[in-house]
Image (cartoon, rainbow, N blue to C red):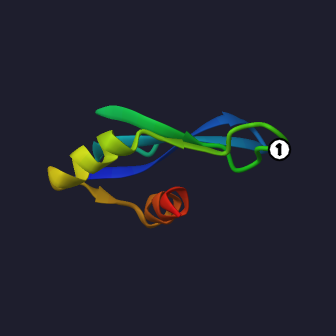
Amino acid sequence: MVTIRLSRGGAKKRPFYHIVVTDSRNARDGRYIERVGFFNPIAAGQEVRLNVQRERVDYWISKGAQTSVRVGKLLEEKSA
């Protein structure tokens, strides 16, 4: 199954997540099909906290991709 989920990056104690489209069997930080955005939970000041290519996410959802719980909440936050 194709899943839209977070892939962790960044340094220790400073997380940074890429929002990726991947096969659900792949490792969390492993191979992915497409990167469709990022999420920076510790953004401060003028830094961008969430950036999503919404048209690509909608495309993958139309093809049957499922979002993880956290990505679903982030997409709701972005659209609100």
Q: For residue 40, what is the image quadrant?
A: top right
Is residue 59 visible in the rendered structure shown here?
yes
Disc 1 marks a residue whose amino acid type is Ala
Residue carrying label 1: 44
Residue 10 in the figure: left or right of residue 43: left
Q: For residue 22, what is the image quadrant?
A: top left
Is residue 30 visible in the rendered structure shown here?
no
Residue 72 in the figure: left or right of residue 56: right
Where in the figure is residue 55, as x and y percent of width and height?
32, 42
Residue at (48, 59) in percent of width and height: 79
Residue at (28, 49) in percent of width and height: 58
Q: Is residue 19 above or below residue 74?
A: above
Residue at (40, 61) in percent of width and height: 68
Screen quadrant of the N terminus:
bottom left
Looking at the image, which is closer to me, 17 or 58?
Answer: 58
Where in the figure is residue 24, as x and y percent of width and height?
29, 51
Where in the figure is residue 51, as x and y percent of width and height?
55, 41
Residue 24 in the figure: left or right of residue 14: left
Secondary structure at numbered mark 1:
loop
Farthest-out residue, left? 63
Residue 37 in the figure: left or right of residue 59: right
Farthest-out residue, front? 80
Residue at (85, 42) in percent of width and height: 45
Number of marks? 1
Q: For residue 49, what is the image quadrant?
A: top right
Looking at the image, which is closer to me, 79 or 62?
Answer: 79
